Image (cartoon, rainbow, N blue to C red):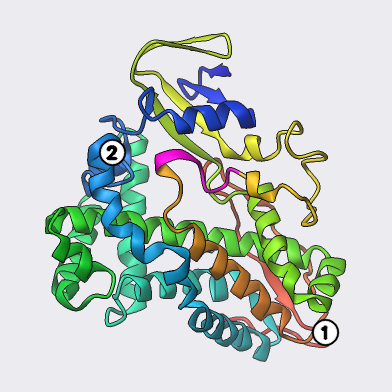
Amino acid sequence: MSWIPDLEAWLVTSHAMCTEVMLDADTFTVDDPRFSTQQVIGPSMLSLDGADHRRHRDPFSTPFRGAAIAELRNEILDKSRRLIAEVAAEGGGDLRSRVAAPLAVGVMAGVLDLDEVPVSDVLGWYEDIVDAVHVVTAGGTVPESGLDAYESLKTAVAANLSSSRLLGPVDDGGSLDVDEIVSNVAVLLFGGIVTSESSTAIAFHYLLADPQAQDALRADGSLARAFVEETFRIEPSAAAVDRYATRDVRLAGAEIAKGDLVRVSLSAANRDPAVFPDPDRLDWARDNLGRSLTFARGPHACLGIHLARMETTAAVEALLGEPGPLNSSGLDPIGGLVFRVPATVEVTWPGSTPSRN
């Protein structure tokens, strides 16, 4: 536990302490007026706790369970192969903008039954809502572009409620009104795009950086899942989550006051040497990858965990399906304070000169 004056927050870094904070939603809550996302999209499963949180989250839980998501595997793998084949046909290119981003947008549009909406529109709404959250986080007011994007999303969702595979049952359940459904759809859209794009780009980054990993995964395709899980551990796409103290509490010798911001560093927890020996080394043979906190813990554990794993694993499998070795002339570093991602992931195939779009 450390007090960080520039953040005006407590920073939690050990695996055990991060887990304790996330599991104790009564003491460390997300339900606080300072939560910037709520100011843009309204109350949702992301910004509520207790009974209200369960009312918002539970109707969405069944469609995101492992068995339901498993039915999407072939579709996601085919989409990944098509996107990568286009890059390979040109001799190479940026795997983040050409594969990871459109894959994340396309998958979420499909899951939320927004297939009839142009991908560019969905991406535009997403970007405007994200930008609005950043503006509010920096102390500004919600910009008109964010409000307009949210209204456009609401119109598209409302028009599709009765026929939607995912949202129809949520609407029929009657526990949420249209505004509440749309708020949660915005959360799912945001989470499903920003974290999946980043996670896939990060996995590509580590794969291109290690020819031996390429050889090992091509020799044994069953290793792809463990490789992806280890990239999730060593570089979570969302590096931290925020909580607010609901009461005065003593934690790890620190006196935390009611209302204090407590930032949980998932990145630090995932590199805690007490849990993961030699934590800065990518090692997909670790026997405790399930202890990674990338997808958080407690009531706000990631709803899309199964979809995220499937999506990035399918993308890695599709990339390895192209003739190798895969080359990179120099990888951009992975950066970002909260959301981590390399700016580009450039790849070329042997003997090829990539064309620039």
Q: Is 323 one of the magenta-colored residues?
A: no
Q: Residue at x 25, y 30 (%)?
A: 33
Secondary structure of the residue carrying numbered label 2: loop
Q: Quadrant of residue 203?
A: bottom right
Q: Quadrant of residue 174?
A: bottom left
Looking at the rendered image, the quarter that the C terminus falls into is bottom right
The nearer-to-camera label among 2 and 1 is: 2
Boundaries of the magenta span = 293-299
Q: Residue furthest bottom?
A: 89
Q: Quadrant of residue 129?
A: bottom left
Looking at the image, residue 131 sits to the left or right of residue 255; the answer is left
Q: Nearer the viewer, residue 114 or 299?
A: 299
Measured from the top left, where is residue 179 in percent x and y? 14, 55
Q: Residue at x 67, y 86 (%)?
A: 88
Secondary structure of the residue carrying numbered label 1: loop
Above or below — where is 314 with respect to 289? Answer: below
Q: Are marks 2 and 1 in contact (CB under 8 Å)?
A: no
Q: Residue at x 35, y 51 (%)?
A: 131
Tell me the amino acid under the disc marked 1: Pro
Tell me the amino acid under the disc marked 2: Leu
Measured from the top left, where is residue 273 in percent x and y? 76, 33
Above or below — where is 293 with respect to 61? Answer: above
Residue at image mark 1: 350
Query: What is the CA distance from the residue labelled 2 to the residue labelled 1?
Result: 51 Å
Main secondary structure of the magenta stretch = loop
Measured from the top left, where is residue 19 in percent x and y? 55, 32
Measured from the top left, where is residue 86 in percent x and y? 59, 88
Residue at image mark 2: 48
